[in-house]
Amino acid sequence: MNRRAFASEALALLVVARDDEGTLEETVREVRAAALAQASRVETILVDDGSRDATAACAERLAAELPGTVALRHLRRQGVGRAVLSAAARSRSGLLLYVPADGRFDPARLPELLEASRRGQVVAGLQSEAVRKSLPGRFWRWLASDLLPEEGDGVGWTYLWRREVFEGLTACCATEAFFLEAAARASRRGMRVVSVSCPPRPGRVRQGAGPIGGLQTILELTRLWGRLRQEDSIEPVERVSRDASPLRGFWWPGRGRRRDGTGPVSGIRPRLERLTVEAGLRPPWLDAEGDLLLPVGPALELPQIGSEILASVGDRPALVREGGRVRFLFDAELSARLRLEEAYAGPPGPLASALARLAARLPSTSLEAIAAAFRAPPAGCAIWPADPAIEWLRWAMLQAAGSQGEDRPPVALWPHGKSWALVVTHGLAPGREETSVRAVSDLDLKLGIRSCWYVAAGLLRSRPELAQGLQEHGWEVGLLATDSELHAAGGGPEGAERWLAGCQELVELHRLSGLRVATLARPAPLPASVARAFEYDCSVPDVEVATLTAPLLGSGSVFPFTSANGSLSLPITLPGPRRLAILGHPARDALGIWRKKVDFIRRVGGLALLAADLEPRLGGSGDWLSVMAELLEPLVSAPDVWLATPAEVARWWGRRGGARHVAGG
């Protein structure tokens, strides 16, 4: 090839180093000399990815000596994929070449790579034939053949890209899996991936990440394969904003249609990731230990060099402080909305739904045996009974807004200057009416509480005097949807609408303002037609572990919020006796669990909503009543609490338009 065959092109060398002090300088000088012979302008971006030796000092020295050379540094190892993204963000060249700093790249191969860039936007430099036929090589090629609709396998160890590949790229892989992801996403955007033979220099040893790094790469590859296959099955649509108090302005993923036109499907289900928060961004009510579970998703932005990392997902920064400004590197509003809507959890399968229906008819010993298989909460994160993830995210967003000069005045959440709210509710299904009404109503009267009773439709029909008597004594009455009733109506959204149609007369007759769906395997959000029939929905817990559907469920919030179906949701923030008994906690244990949760709610200024449903089949109703009395007696006389019914909370929240900004204490 003639000298300066790419005289009109600017070339960036993205050199990634980790513990490469012995080979970095030689690699940079050799490859840079070869590049200057081909391109009109060459810039060299050196990235030290958390080296433990003198690599960083060597990179800084080279940056000072060589024109057009910049040295970047990751204080902690973030992976070769993140290092390439950091370098690409600093580059302004039209061509970008990845060069490992371990000396394996042969500068004599550069002309072939540059020539191949005329045929495609992504050029993969292939390994030797022996490596490609090895077991790891075949695994990579198998994935590439499924993800890259191009000739050639597209699996290289070094790559040359045109700049448009990185424009709008939202990569989720941090390890070497990034290279395949970048190629696959470029291919889906109409770009071409080509490959040329570019074996490493003989005798040069790769400075790999070891067995742990290799395993991380394989795990990222398998997740990437599943994610891209999912994305291929859904047509992207424009996202629409929703009025989501108290997180107003949050985005909710739009609806799409399967490519075969079979009907609407929701956006891709995210996965919960562990977010580690540094001491510099922990509010007073957040424990010093334990990670947070949030659907963080891919990074949307890159941190600046020298940024203070405030929160991270593994080795990937998620929240940074730059020059006094706090900045999210992911879509915080979307993360909160996905968490509130339980988008990370799939619908209950047939087995879970069947077990939930059977549980309504089983004796206590059988119910406990079934529940025992689902008792173990997720390990490694203190998420129950108080999950602080959403409240921390809300608090952190306020800190970020304040650091950027936005005026966010505090909002009085509850009436009469109260700092938190307390609501007590009960469920009343056939077979429990005599025990529950007599015992629990006496406790309410003793404490001076006006609670809410959710009564099953069948019971309202057979004993209408129950609802009338409760309302005459000042209690609120709502409608309870049981597993058996929803199943009898056919199940699913259509069954819920049929069930509501059969209950419409009861709703109007008894002036029922609220709804609770009581099921061990909660379905997807109720249809909008059902939600609009009531002022609020009191079905979703803020955090629930070891369910029949998933290890973790719940909105994560101890504040009311607007659901995707348009209804105002009042989360159940204090697990009831029935739920605690199923989890294996006796009545005496419940007092400590409730007090711990109430302390958290008071500190963030939220809603303490107790679902005090007694379960005769699990025994000990008298013990549970005495424990509830011990919990509630000091709370109802607290000067900072607003005692209310669910309908009063819903109307107050609606009049205020929700609380836009909740900082917590």
Image: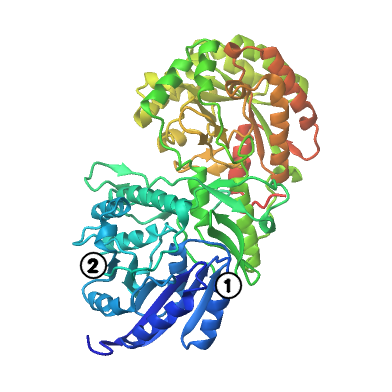
Q: Helix, strand, or loop for circle 1?
A: loop
For marks 2 and 1, give the one nearer the viewer: 1
How far from the left and from the top, in percent, is residue 206? 41, 64
Viewer-closest of 592 and 653: 592
| Numbered circle sitting on residue 348 | none
SS for callout 2: strand
**Along the horizontal axis of the image, is 307 left or right of 107?**
right
Quadrant of residue 380 in the image? top right
Q: Residue at x 73, y 38 (%)?
A: 599
Residue in the foreground of this view, choosing between 99 and 207: 207
Left or right, 527 with respect to 648, comes to left
Which dot marks residue 54? 1
- Left or right, 230 with respect to 542, comes to left
**What residue is shown at x 70% (from left), y 44% (from top)?**
605
Color theme of the render: rainbow
Crowd band around label 2 with a 10 angstrom C-alpha radius: few (<14), some (14–19), many (20+)? many
- On the rendered image, what quadrant is the N terminus found in? bottom left
Amino acid at pointer 1: Ala
> Quadrant of the rendered structure where residue 422 is?
top right
Query: In 3D space, how far apart are the residues under numbered discs 2 and 1 (Cα atoms)?
Result: 37 Å
Q: In the rendered view, tell whether residue 182 sits above or below residue 24.
A: above
Question: Mark number for residue 194?
Answer: 2
